[in-house]
Image: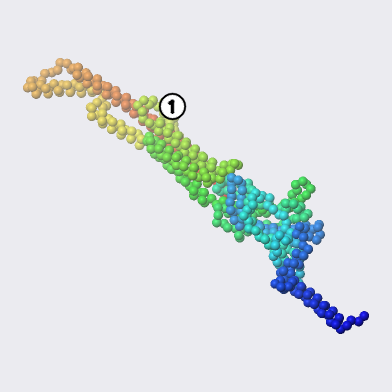
Amino acid sequence: MRLSSAGTALIFLLIQGASRACTVKKAGGGTGRFANATLVRLSEFLSAGYKKGVRPVKDWRTSTIVAIDLMVYSILNVDEKNQVLTTYVWYRQSWTDEFLVWNPEDFDEVKQVSIPTANVWVPDILINEFVDVGKSPDIPYVYVTHDGLVRNYKPIQVVTACTLNIYNFPFDVQKCSLTFQSWLHTIDDINITLMRTPEELKEDKSVFMNQGEWELLHILSNYKIFSVDNDDYYAEMKFHVVIRRRPLFYTVNLLLPSIFLMVMDIVGFYLPPDSGERVSFKITLLLGYSVFLIIVSDTLPATAIGTPLIGVYFVVCMALLVISLTETVLIVRLVHKQDLQTPVPHWVKYLVLERAPVLFCIHKKHRLCSRLSSQASDLDYKDNNYGTAQCTHHHTCEIGRRLSQHDREAGLIRMGLPPVPSRDPTPPVMDNILQEVTAIRHFLEKRDRAREVAKEWLQVGYVLDVLLFRVYLVAMVAYSITLGTLWSVWQVA
């Protein structure tokens, strides 16, 4: 059967049109604005027949290896009360998708392309410690290379549960874990590995913002395979984020003011024990420390697990201030001079005034005795105005006789009569004067005895005050050395 020339020409035109159509489709994948668009053509090539709900392996026995990496960008919040850590991390994961492979020569040497995350298979790797959804930005794309490597990089605000130990606050070091694992797939389907070596991951602080309260020490990694029912085994990668609190703020605002108040409490012991100024001074310090504790109560972390050591330190300091005030009140009461105060017992004199100064190298309180003697001399001077201080009965009688004789002789001379010797040496008036002088003498002797008793109690109070001050000072030094040693050891560790 022979075709006519017109039929032959028509067949030639049809073949030529079909050839041009194939050439246009190969070059641009379409017509109009998508003509010659290599990325559009590559996207259509990759999405043709792709099933994102199927694990991307040709042999189902092959496990998909997911490499992950973690970089801590910032420590946003550490909630000690609720045991929650909020961090901002840069999370990276990559895997091989055997269905997203192409030849770069067929697509203008394009070796990688970004495609929507919703269009590809993504492993269900989650963080086990998640307790809240953070404000993480949505990254809708992943990078795919020509050999099927899919890279999913995204920043995440991680709100995780963490067991926080605040016993060493503010010199505490916290270790929180971020555990990445597939929620459903076993190790036969999805296995996890690291993008970098554990040493590189541990020392990497390149993106961390270190101007806040917390300092990033290092990130440790640990790979483990576990089973829940001894049947299916799962792979997990655990990152231990080790952070340390910077204690400068709390040292300046909490520890130093407390130390200053305790030093002033020690200085207050140098006030004389027989004055009331020490009691008012100690009470002022105690009230100031109470106000200080009220102010810092909101700063200390509150947990139901335990009390930080600094809280115990504040309580002990408060107790020391109370003990110091109690000691001051007892000493002031002991040395307070009263007329009806009982004499010092002999055993107290022996133990406190004789044995204690020798054993504890306590010097005599000469200043207190001299002060007391000066007070006594002042009183004696006032009493001497009456002409009755420090005299015996014999001297008093002689004074009375001389005064009465002198008065009689002076009266006779003024009247122009010769003096007459007195026949009655002790008239009734002089007897009354003698009784009054005797009563004054007994009063002065009684007051001198009370003064001697008060002086002895003052010496006892001085020795006890020095002794208790030394005990208090030793307790303070031992307490300070213990706390300093513990905090130094914990800080180094």
Considering every residue shown, the one lying at the far bottom of the view is 5
Residue highlighted by disc 1: 347
Q: Which residue is drawn at the image coordinates 65% and 49% (left, top)?
A: 131
Which residue is more in the foreground, 327 or 437? 327
Can residue 201 be seen at all in this image of the molecule? Answer: no
Can residue 270 be seen at all in this image of the molecule? Answer: yes
Q: Position of residue 472 (x, y in %)?
A: 47, 38
Amino acid of disc 1 = Trp
Considering every residue shown, the one lying at the far top of the view is 423
Q: Which residue is drawn at the image coordinates 36% and 35% (left, top)?
A: 368
Which residue is more in the foreground, 323 or 66? 66
Assign a secondary structure to mark 1: helix
Give the left or right position of residue 308, taking residue 151 as reference. Answer: left
Task: Tell me if mark 1 has few (under 14), some (14-19) or many (20+) residues whose alpha carbon lies within 10 angstroms of its own.
Answer: few
Q: Position of residue 381 (x, y in %)?
A: 26, 31
Q: Which residue is drawn at the image coordinates 65% and 58% (left, top)?
A: 138
Q: Which residue is drawn at the image coordinates 9% and 23% (left, top)?
A: 414
Q: Position of residue 71 (x, y in %)?
A: 64, 57
Above or below, comparing residue 397 to residue 235 in the picture: above
Give the left or right position of residue 481, taking residue 181 as reference. Answer: left
